[in-house]
Amino acid sequence: MYTLRSYQQEAVNSTLQYFRKQRHPAVIVLPTGAGKSLVIAELAKIAKGRVLVLAHVKELVEQNHLKYESYGLLAGIYSAGLKQKDYAQKVIFGSIQSVAKAADTFFRDFTLLVIDECHRVSMESDSQYAKVIKQLKLNNPRICILGLTATPYRLGHGWIYNYALRGEIKTQELRFFKHCIYELPLEYMIQNRFLTPPVKVDIPVTSYDFSELTEAGKAYTMAQLEEVLQRQRRLTPLIIKNIIDITERDQRQGVMIFSATVKHAQEIMEHLPAGQARLVIGTTELSERDQIVDDFKQKSFKYLVNVSVLTTGFDAAHVDVIAILRPTESISLYQQIIGRGLRLENGKRDCLVLDYTGMGHSIFSPEIGEKKPVSESVPVQITCPECGFVNDFWGILDETGNVLEHYGRKCRGGKVNPHSYEFTPCGYRFRFKICPHCDAENDITARDCSTCGSVLIDPDVKLKEAKLSKNAHVLTPDSIEMLERVDKKGTPYLQIKYYDYDANFVTEIHYLNSQTSLKKFNINFLRSHLRKPELKLNLHTVDEVVKIQPLLRMPAFVIARKQGKFWKITEKIFSDEL
């Protein structure tokens, strides 16, 4: 019998509270090692009707079943991999592959469905999860569906649910799960000594360079990854030697190496000590995989190499070195990989994290949900000036850790009705473009007005047309010069020069000597140029504007058009609009 930790009981209470008021599928997010199986066991124990607990691998089915039976209760297993197909018990722990093939009579009388590693559930109607859920709902339309995961963000898909517990929009796209009803950060688990502290080691040797794949803004293929690794093959022996040296110097007990591809894993194996390393890949026979994992847990060998197969459903508490040799743009997956080494064990003081990818992920960073806009950007927190919600965006920090610039467009905050769980978004836009027909604010990349439906000018099209026009000049700025000038009447004005790499320049001017001119300056210049657009600056003079130049960003392109004998700047296009 186990006693729930405080956060596990909170997760159970949140579930009960939610399903008393709602029937939309919900998610609980707990980091690796937080004891999801205990939360599942408690919910199954107190549920009034029958409970079905699904997982995608037999190890999780077995682990969840054992935790439930530790309460002194009996439960059935429905899994071909575990050679059991029980129907009758109140609680059934099953593998999705087996349950999806079960007879119609299997699905009767269930009131709660729990899905472990629920980030694997998709919206596709022909998936195994969709078929099982359809059958369950035919027998009970009001069945409660709860998912548990450590990684609620999937590459190529995004967030698996719409609304977060703290009143935040994760995505407005259609998702199977509606609400996250409980979430626990990895940092809490480590600070409260529920997990082993990770120690990220500054690697004294070179790292792989995956920048051409990860900074391209597009998904990369295995073939492209293989090509990059092939060009950097000479680095692998150096990296493996470094792992071995650190492991032996610190007398480490268990090392997990996460490789990028099967070929890469095989290459890694060539440089590890004979008899001290084993390899697990997707095609490894299940019986062989089970034996390898069991031998590793018994410390029969020290180095376990794998390719994307041991990130979930794997528990070897003695692991005290995690070596990452594969790229990932998902911070959640990165943290889950590290989580393989954070379980507690007697005598284990910490877990070394050796990252040879050069990607610079943080162990405790939040998942932002968008690709990095520039390589030097890091997660930053930006408070909405309208609702006070603290947003996690990508941004740039100065040397003292202050936010210089952020790339957030719209506040993700809002209010959740505690009774109906209805979500009302804040709607504040940090950056926007205004519809010329109805004056509505739209996302800077919008092609149609969200209010009136009018077609908005596409910056890419605008740029292409300007480059083809004889009466337009497109300048790519390299620097900006801001000067105070005086006209013939003695009135000061602001002159701004945009220089390209060849020192060619185009100029714009702004007067600041009246309320009308100040308003025009704020709308036509300041709103789009501020690196932190939510800043409210009370500027009245040219000198004041010149002094805030470090707070301003530079456009990617400046378009000037011939007007008489002169060139006049008519459009500025920033990189985030393209």
Image: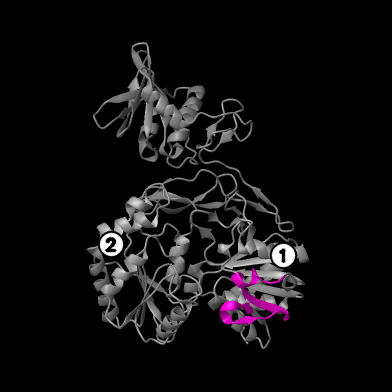
SS for tag 2? loop
Q: Amino acid at mark 2?
A: Ser
Going from N to C along the chain, the mark reached first, 1 or 2, is 1
Count up the numbered dots. 2
* Relative height, residue 117 to residue 330 (above, below): below
**Front-most of residues 195 and 137:** 137
From the viewer's perspective, tell me whether residue 119 is left or right of residue 222. Answer: right
> Residue 430 location in percent, x, y?
52, 41
Question: Residue 376's x, y, as percent?
Answer: 35, 51
Image quadrant where residue 63 sits: bottom right
Q: Quadrant of the N terminus?
A: bottom right
Mark 1 = which residue? 135
Whether residue 129 is in magenta: the answer is no
Which region of the structure is painted magenta?
A: 78-103
Task: Quickly name the residue at label 2.
Answer: 207
Image depth: mark 1 or mark 2 in front: 1
- Residue drawn at 35 percent across, 54 percent down: 224
Other-residue count near label 2 (Cα within 10 Å), few / some / many at <14 / 14–19 / ≥20: some
